[in-house]
């Protein structure tokens, strides 16, 4: 996954957009999908409502979660898949409670989003490196960091071993009328 500029012919504007290597996604193991799905659960990835937002916010379509075939963000299909693969990891299972699952569309005032995701699998070890940036428009703040999540995979389970996060670089910005 990477971020680049994409032209929207309907809006006649160019926007920063997430691009996915769908050929690679189609060849991923279930353990790799669970690792990417876990990371993508907590960082925005071009999420938008399928139609109007449901009262229970159950129809948020997120680009990476959808590409992995996991359904809507925070749906039982999404969280159930991750709970199955992380069934032996109490800390991850605690994080995967419905109440912890964010349903934040890409137009939210404050949000994080991916700039890049790289997965590396060697034997039973899976690492997911990702770069994130975020903004809070109301507070006129932005930030960025990178992180690597390390997993151990078995034939029917995945365990998060460690996360290594860089320092968070924060800065203020001004919104001007042009």
Image (cartoon, helix red, strand yellow):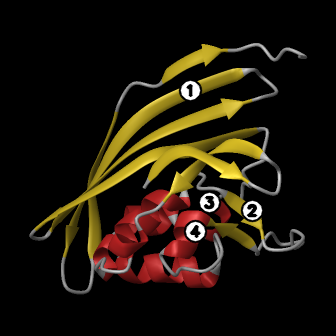
Is residue 154 toward the left or the right of residue 166 in the image?
Answer: left
CA–CA distance in space, label 4 to label 1 = 26 Å
Are the two marked residues, 3 and 4, in contact with CB atoms closer than 8 angstroms?
yes
CA–CA distance in space, label 3 to label 2 = 19 Å
Q: Mark on residue 97?
A: 4
CA–CA distance in space, label 3 to label 1 = 22 Å
Q: Earlier in the sequence, mark 3 or mark 1?
A: 3
Determine the residue positioned at 86% across, 74% down: 51
Determine the residue positioned at 83% across, 72% down: 56
Is residue 23 toward the left or the right of residue 135 in the image?
Answer: left
Residue 99: x, y in percent? 67, 64
Is residue 167 toward the left or the right of residue 27 in the image?
Answer: right
- The 10 Å Cα crowd at callout 2, few under 14, some 14 to 19, many 20 or more, is many
Q: Which residue is mark 1?
A: 143
Q: In what element is the residue under mark 3?
A: helix
Are the two marked residues, 4 and 1, in contact with CB atoms closer than 8 angstroms?
no
Q: Which residue is mark 2?
A: 48
User: Would you place residue 110 above or below residue 70 in this image?
Assistant: above
- Mark 4 or 1, which is nearer the eye? 1
Q: In what element is the residue under mark 4?
A: loop
User: Would you place residue 47 above or below residue 65 in this image?
Assistant: above
CA–CA distance in space, label 2 to label 1 = 22 Å
User: Would you place residue 141 above or below residue 18 in this image?
Assistant: above
**The quarter of the displayed image where residue 112 is located:** top right
Q: In what element is the residue under mark 2?
A: strand
Q: Quadrant of the C terminus?
A: top right
Determine the residue positioned at 69% across, 42% down: 14
Q: Which residue is mark 3?
A: 100
Q: Quadrant of the N terminus?
A: bottom left
């Amino acid at each position: 996954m990477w971020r680049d500029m994409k032209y929207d012919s309907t809006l006649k504007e160019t926007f920063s957009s997430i691009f996915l290597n769908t050929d690679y996604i189609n060849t991923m193991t279930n353990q790799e999908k669970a690792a990417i799905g876990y990371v993508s659960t907590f960082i925005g990835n071009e999420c938008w409502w399928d139609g109007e937002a449901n009262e229970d916010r159950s129809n948020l379509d997120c680009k990476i979660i959808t590409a992995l075939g996991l359904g809507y963000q925070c749906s039982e299909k999404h969280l159930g898949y991750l709970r199955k693969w992380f069934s032996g990891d109490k800390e991850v299972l605690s994080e995967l409670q419905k109440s912890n699952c964010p349903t934040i569309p890409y137009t939210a005032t404050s949000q994080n989003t991916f700039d890049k995701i790289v997965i590396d699998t060697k034997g039973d070890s899976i690492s997911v490196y990702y770069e994130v940036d975020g903004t809070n428009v109301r507070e006129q703040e932005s930030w960025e960091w990178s992180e690597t999540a390390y997993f151990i995979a078995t034939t029917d389970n995945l365990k998060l071993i460690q996360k290594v996060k860089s320092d968070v670089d924060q800065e203020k910005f001004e919104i001007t009328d042009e």
